[in-house]
Image: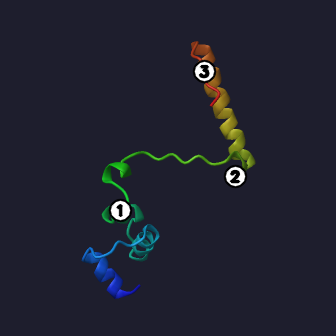
Amino acid sequence: MDPASVSRWKLGKNTPSADRVIAVARHFGRNPVEALVVARYLEPREVDASIELAASAAALTDDELITAVRRRLELARGMVASGSPVSHD
């Protein structure tokens, strides 16, 4: 990492790219999300939000897929028993 680049970042003369911010944070053992907030790529309120990542069914192992289907069937069964409409999302 070029010390002159870091100096320009500190002085606000330029802004590092998001991928560079992440690389620097990881190099120094810091949280990349925290660094993205400091670099103003993210707002603090965005960081407080919950993030749910959905994996493709193709990426699941057989056991994970069976577990997911079982959970969905149990949820649907519970909704039917309670008279709630079943969503097919």
Q: Secondary structure at mark 2?
A: helix
Where is residue 8? Give x, y as percent: 30, 80
* Amino acid at the residue labelled 3: Gly
* Amino acid at the residue labelled 1: Glu
Mark before the other along the chain sequence, 3 or 1: 1
Q: Is residue 76 above or below residue 21?
A: above
Residue under circle 1? 34
Residue at 46% in and 69% down? 19
- Viewer-proximal residue, 2 or 77? 2
Q: Is residue 39 above or below residue 57?
A: below
Where is residue 41? Give x, y as percent: 37, 61
* Amino acid at the residue labelled 2: Ala
Disc 3 crowd, CA 10 A, few/some/many (<14, 14-19, 20+): few
Q: Are marks 3 and 1 in contact (CB under 8 Å)?
A: no
Residue at 27% in and 76% down? 10
Residue under circle 2? 59
| Marking on residue 78 | 3
Quadrant housing residue 34? bottom left
Q: Secondary structure at mark 3?
A: helix
Of the 4 image quadrants, the one containing the C terminus is: top right
| C-alpha span from label 2 to label 3 | 28 Å
